[in-house]
Every structure is written in C-alpha cells, then in structure tokens.
Image: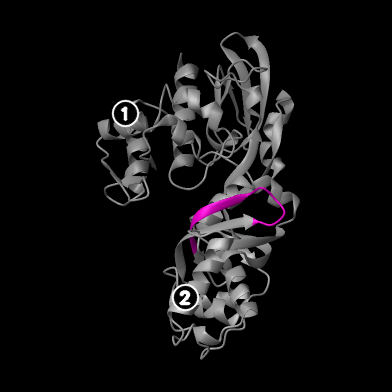
C-alpha cells in the first residue's frame, strides 16, 4: 500500500523520475496521511522488515473493497466496459467544458476530468491527449529483470545473496542490495532498482549490455587481494572450494572458483598468483552479458508519460487545459519497488481530486 519511511526527503529519493515534484506534494498528503486515511476506513496496515506496508489481512481485496465501499457511500457512479474514444473541449456551456465520446457512441459532457489511466508500454496509450498539445515523454519499461545471454550461473537458479553491487559497464549506473539468480538471469532488489534508474538508458541500448557484479562489497581491490593472501598463509592445507568466504552460498562459491580455474581439490598452499587474481576479479567485478529483460512478477511500471512541466504543481491541473487534471502513473513519475509507486498514486490522486472537487 505504501512504505513506512517517515522522512519525506528520504521517501522522495526512491523516485528515479518525479521525486522533487512529489516532495512538495507530500506536505499535503504523504505516507503517514495515507495510513491514517485507510485506518479511518477500518483498514489496519502492517509493516514488513523492508518498510513495505500491507493490509493485515494479507489480501489486496481489503484495499479494493475499502475504495469501492467509500465510493458507494459517497454516491459515486462507477461505470465499467465504457472505453473512451475521444475527449473534446467545447464552449457550449460554462459548466460543460468537455465532451467525452465512448466507443459505444454515447457522449458525456463534463465540467472537469481527472485523467488517471495509469502507465502504458507505448506512446499510443496517450493518443487521447494529443489533441490537447500536451507533451508526453516517450514511455519505456521500468522495474524489470535481466536475461543472461549464456552463462552456467543459471544452474544456480533460486540462490540469493543478501548484499551485492551491480554496475552497468561503461555507464554511471550502479545499485546495491539483494540479488536473486533465476533460470533466465538475475532478479531481486539490486537488479530492479538498477532497471528503474537506468530505464531510459537501457531502452536506448535495446536491452543488450554488460553488467559487473561485486559479490563482496566489504573490501576494495587492494584489501581483497591482501585478504586472499592472508587466507593462503593462514589456511595452507584447506581446500579452497570447500571453504566459502564472505558468507557466500557454497554453490555460488564453487561456481566462482571453477570460473577462476580453481579445481575442486586445490589447496590454498598451491594456488598461483594468476588464479588468485582471477578469483579476486570474479569476486569484485564478475562480468555478464545481458540480452533482454523480463517483467517482474507480471508487473509493469512506466518510465515516461505526461511531462511534469505541463502541470500546475499544487493542483495537478493541466496548464494549457482548464479543468483537466492528472494523477498516478500517467504522469512522468515512477519509483523503485517498496510501496513507493502506490504512494505516488495516493498523493497525486488525493490532491488532484481535492482540487477538481473545489
């Protein structure tokens, strides 16, 4: 539903796009007010270790039913299967500024409109807005996992490491956190965060790029080499493959050793400098070729949408079109995982709705 982070500035840092825009809006309706809103409606929320907040029922229908029941009590009419074909500005009546044509042919007149259609994977999803001359930043996917071209590491599918650093080779983009090895490549928070911050850059590359993984974040290059040398001196008779370091899972440690030409019976006493250096390189700068992406848990988050310069920040009304408001992912605002995308929807929805109602 949201995230438990209480400091607005820290909260806003989870948005690759739109964080500074949202920061001023959090003064009006932030995560704390979202929690209070739902609790006032009888929905109790609980907090996970990573800050994500869920209804204590562990059921998304709890939130859906809350919203539907609230709408019902307020006498709101919700129509489904009523696709919008066009929206036109009209000047027939000061209280009827828009005419909405449905695919059924029916026409509805309106004084104000809240445009909250969510994100879209293609620019065609924004076609209705084109008649209003509103700038749309080209939409591309965000929050996706990485497909490995060819690597035996996928044989370790299901294995996770709690803290790594992942870099996109040749760029400024890097991310840290847990990583999960899957049967197609890499997932987990470190990968998903990286895909969000580098969404547009990776789209331009056609999702073919190289990454480097640091499996032992605690040591830099020289420190790691010194550490391995100390292990060699202190444990000369120990088999390298049989004694994982840095708390790494044993299967991953074996894989790293094998890819450093360290055989299963090699002792620390007998390791050459060449193999030791190769192991250090694989621990700190392990390379993988990425070819393609996969959607995370069938979710889709859009990087792109209505340019924020088109919007009055305090009301979320379009600067060029009086009476047209926006909220949610139709705006060029998106976040990493953790409840932050939901909060952007609650915040912009509350403020746009309030000003539209006024």
Q: Residue at image x 58%, y 70%?
A: 280
For the magenta stretch, what is the residue range? 168-179
> Pointer 2 and pointer 1: residues touching (CB < 8 Å)?
no
Secondary structure, mark 1, is: helix
Distance between the alpha carbons at the discs numbered 2 and 1: 69 Å
Instruction: Give the image location of residue 331, x and y in percent.
Output: 59, 33
Given residues 139 and 124, the one toward you in this image is 139
Left or right? Give the position of 250 relative to 213: left
Q: Residue at image x 59%, y 76%?
A: 276
Q: Quadrant of residue 319?
A: top right
Q: Residue at image x 46%, y 67%?
A: 160
Secondary structure, mark 2, is: helix
Outermost residue, top direction?
94
Q: Residue at image x 32%, y 38%?
A: 66
Given residues 53 and 58, the one toward you in this image is 53
Given residues 35 and 267, the one toward you in this image is 267
Q: Is residue 329 magenta?
A: no
* Residue to which mark 1 is pinned: 73
Residue 231: image tag = 2
């Amino acid at each position: 539903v949201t995230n438990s982070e209480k400091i607005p500035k820290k909260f806003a840092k989870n948005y690759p796009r739109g964080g500074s825009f949202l920061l001023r809006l959090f003064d009006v309706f932030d995560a704390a007010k979202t929690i209070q809103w739902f609790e006032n409606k009888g929905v109790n929320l609980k907090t996970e270790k990573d800050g994500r907040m869920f209804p204590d029922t562990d059921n998304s229908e709890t939130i859906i039913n809350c919203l539907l029941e609230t709408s019902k009590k307020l006498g709101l009419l919700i129509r489904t299967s009523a696709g919008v074909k066009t929206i036109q500005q009209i000047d027939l009546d000061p209280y009827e500024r828009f005419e909405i044509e449905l695919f059924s042919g029916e026409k509805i007149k309106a004084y104000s409109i809240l445009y909250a259609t969510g994100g879209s994977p293609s620019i065609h999803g924004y076609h209705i807005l084109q008649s209003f001359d509103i700038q749309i930043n080209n939409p591309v996917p965000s929050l996706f996992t990485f497909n490995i071209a060819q690597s035996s590491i996928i044989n370790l599918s299901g294995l996770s490491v709690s803290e790594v650093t992942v870099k996109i080779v040749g760029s400024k983009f890097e991310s840290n956190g847990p990583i999960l090895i899957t049967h197609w490549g890499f997932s987990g928070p470190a990968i998903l965060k990286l895909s969000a911050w580098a969404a547009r850059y990776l789209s331009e590359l056609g999702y073919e790029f190289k990454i480097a993984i640091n499996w032992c974040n605690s040591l830099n290059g020289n420190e790691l080499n010194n550490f391995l040398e100390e292990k060699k001196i202190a444990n000369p008779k120990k088999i390298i493959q049989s004694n994982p370091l840095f708390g790494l899972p044993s299967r991953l440690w074996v894989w790293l050793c094998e890819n450093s030409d360290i055989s299963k019976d090699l002792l620390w006493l007998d390791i050459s400098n060449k193999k030791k250096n190769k192991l250090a390189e694989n621990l700190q700068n392990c390379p993988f070729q990425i070819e393609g992406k996969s959607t995370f848990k069938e979710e889709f988050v859009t990087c792109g949408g209505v340019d924020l310069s088109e919007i009055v920040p305090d009301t979320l009304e379009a600067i060029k079109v009086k009476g047209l408001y926006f909220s949610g992912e139709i705006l060029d605002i998106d976040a990493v995982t953790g409840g932050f995308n939901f909060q952007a929807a609650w915040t912009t929805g509350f403020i746009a709705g309030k000003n539209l109602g006024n």
